[in-house]
Image: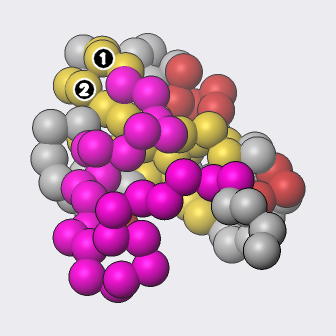
Amino acid sequence: MPRRNRPRRPGAGSGGDEPRPLGAASWARRESGPDGDWLVRTVAGSQTVKTYRCPGCDHEITPGTPHVVAWPADEYGSAADRRHWHSGCWNGRRHRRPTRRWW
């Protein structure tokens, strides 16, 4: 019988696990700014398959474009709380406010 190389996680595969809040995601980094605390994840262009609208510039983020996804750090949040930003727009948000359309 082959040896199992991966450690078993409690509840893995049971389907009964409680969903984790977005704020507990370990793959996101925490960033603080004048607009609050955010969890931010970088998305590689090869991983993008949908078109999103950047709240910083109100332009589309087309499939294949690397960008960042940000959501409030102190809330449980859902997919509706996530915003996809161009990397430059996210980094420049201190100097330019998001468009009114999203907020």
**Numbered label tally:** 2
Kindly indicate whether the residue at mark 2 contacts the one at mark 1 (C-beta within 8 angstroms): yes
Q: Quadrant of the N terminus?
A: bottom right
Query: 86 or 29: nearer the eye?
Result: 29
Q: Residues within 10 Å of mark 1 (few under 14, many from 20)?
A: few
Image location (x, y in percent) of residue 103: 26, 52
79 up-or-down from 98: above or below: below
10 falls in the magenta region: yes
Residue stretch rendered in magenta on the structure: 5-30
Residue 51's disc number:
none
Query: 87 or 17: nearer the eye?
Result: 17
Sequence order check: which comes first, mark 1 or mark 2? Answer: 1
Q: Residue furthest left?
A: 75
Query: 23 or 31: nearer the eye?
Result: 23
Residue 37's disc number:
2
Residue at image point 37% right, 25% down: 30
Image location (x, y in percent) of residue 43: 67, 46
- Please say whether residue 58 is visible from this viewpoint: no
79 falls in the magenta region: no
Residue at image point 62% right, 38% down: 42
Q: Quadrant of residue 12?
A: bottom left
Q: Residue furthest front?
A: 1
- Please say whether residue 71 is visible from this viewpoint: yes
Amino acid carrying mark 1 in the image? Ser
Amino acid carrying mark 2 in the image? Asp
Structural distance between the alpha carbons of marks 1 and 2: 4 Å
Query: 72 or 94: nearer the eye?
Result: 72
Which structural element holds mark 1? strand
| Residue matched to label 1 | 32
As drawn, is 93 to the left or to the right of 16? right
Which structural element holds mark 2? strand
